[in-house]
Amino acid sequence: MTDTAMRPTHPPRRRRPWWRTASAHLPLIIVAMITLFPFFVMLVISVQPGQAIDLPRSLWPQSWDFSEFGRLLSRGEMTTWIINTAIYAVVSVVLVLALASMAAYAFAKLSFPGRNVVFLVMVAMLMVPYHLTLIPKFILISELGGLNTHWGLILPTIANVQALFLMRQFIAGIPNELIEAARIDGAGELRIFWQIILPQTKPILATLGVFVFLWHWNDFLWPLVANTASAKYTLTVGLSSLNEEQTSLAVTMAGALITFVPIFIIFLIMQRYFVRGVTMSGIK
Amino acid sequence: MIFVLPYLLIFLAFRILPAFGGLGLSLSDYSLTGDISWVGGDNFERLFGDDLFWNALRVTIVYSVIAVPLVVVVSLFMAHLASRSIRGIKVYRAAFFLPVITSLVTTAVIWQWIYSSEGPLNWFLGVFGVGPVPWLASSIAVLPSLAVVAMWSRFGYDMLILMAGMLDIPQDYYEAASLDGANAWQRFRHITLPGLRRPLFFVVILEIVSSFQVFDLIYVMTGGGPVTASYSLVFMIYDQGFGYFNFGYASAAGVVLLVITLIVSAIQRLYLKDDD
């Protein structure tokens, strides 16, 4: 009150009438409810194991029974799948970022023979659909003895072109004076990269990191063909097999929820990086 | 040189080599024992005489014709809705983005039940005496049903791109138009849409590419069925390759996908050149 009285030049902002606020929120609430409905369904079905589905009563569970989660996790398989997926995602993130940032530094700031030709070849390779390369990749990994191993799953995915392009663009924006100054001080390329370039790229590393994690956590086709032994499944492949077995709907939904929750938690913590990543891809 | 070497080696082995490998395989016969024999154009000859291939092409095109406009229009509408500045808008935006981070297998598993004959959608229609509609089990409904799931899982992403584009349109334009008496639709039609040309074009290309490559949803929800009503080109590559281990034949289908991709990107280039 005193605040507005002390500043007579600014008329006090008129409060919107309640119905204006409500009508602004109403369409958003309706669309949000439709969007969130599948998540709601996944949750309520997973906590009603052993019960016949009876709509609409099943949408409002009488009791919340989380025993299906315990049973799934204690069966061992599911826990193995979680570990497999975590290894696939975390190791890939580290390797993708390491390879891409090093190569991006070279492409942006150093000159080496054939630099432009190599770069053109990379752009051209973007045109080749993933699915054409799937079978040769499978044969290659199979010849190397990498089927049903962690490294065989990870290795073909770590030379990420999008990551390289984004990093190159970002590193190109770092002033050359900074690098020159370090060179005059006698720093080697490795030290320049480690102490000058990398610290500058932190925000983009975080953005890329969450996306690479997301791609690998949710990846389906490559793990499906490369790791066919059930002890080597990732969560997506395991969930698809649970769904095919059709043990019960509650089991499948519990599996779906277990696959979703880790990525959901990461999203809650790193939300702004997700948003930044999307808008970056759109600007280009 | 040390900096690029690790990346380039992996890129060479798992990107360039497989690309040429795919082209080579399409012209050969690969048996599971590892023997490769050159068969020239035989795979393509067989492909172009195969009803399954023409069906896959038709399924892919029909699906894209449904899915691309659906996703783009919904994303545009949602971007418009979510660009308002009201209290709590960030919570709504986060809710709209949740499907994007959800794996397509999770998405497929949930929607499979939503669409099933005992599922909530048919229960809801049943209240009005309609149905049950065989959403995934009828050859007419299956592609639109899959397109709706793709729309659910993708609109949050496109929405953010379009919203960023909307923020770049100067606010003065809208104020001037309001003073001239333009209504909300006219402002959207004559200011927002033209201002969004580039992001909108980007989103359309993105959706064409993604709808041509739809796989996870089909694999989990329909397996290409009923019969072959959702047997798409990419599903054919997988099915021929890893269901029947006809690596050469599957690669020939992959080369067709490559040709389509090249045509789309050529059109994209022409359009962008016109723009400048």
Image (tube, rainbow, N blue to C red):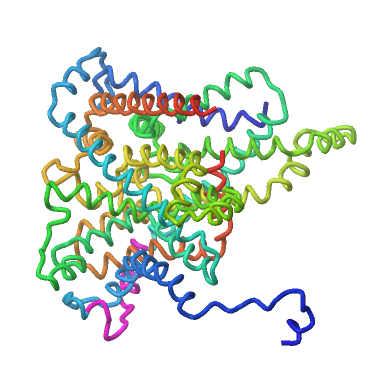
Quick check: can you spot residue A87?
no
Verify whether residue B237 appears in magenta: no
Question: In this rendering, would B172 be left or right of B115?
Answer: right
User: B40 or B125, which lies in front?
Assistant: B125
**Looking at the picture, does residue A22 appear above or below residue B181?**
below
Q: Position of residue A82 (x, y in %)?
A: 41, 59
Quarter of the image holding residue A109? top right
Please, which residue is most extreme toward the front here? B180
| Residue at the image position 60 percent from the left and 38 percent from the top | A100
Residue range in magenta is A58-78
Quarter of the image holding residue A118? top right
Quarter of the image holding residue A173? top right
Q: Position of residue B191 (x, y in %)?
A: 50, 47
Q: Position of residue B9 (x, y in %)?
A: 54, 28
User: A42 or B65, which lies in front?
Assistant: B65
Q: Position of residue B7 (x, y in %)?
A: 57, 32
Question: In this rendering, would A274 be left or right of A145?
Answer: right
Quick check: can you spot residue A6?
yes
Question: In this rendering, would A13 be left or right of B206?
Answer: right
Q: Quadrant location of the N terminus of chain B?
A: top right
Q: Quadrant location of the C terminus of chain B?
A: top right
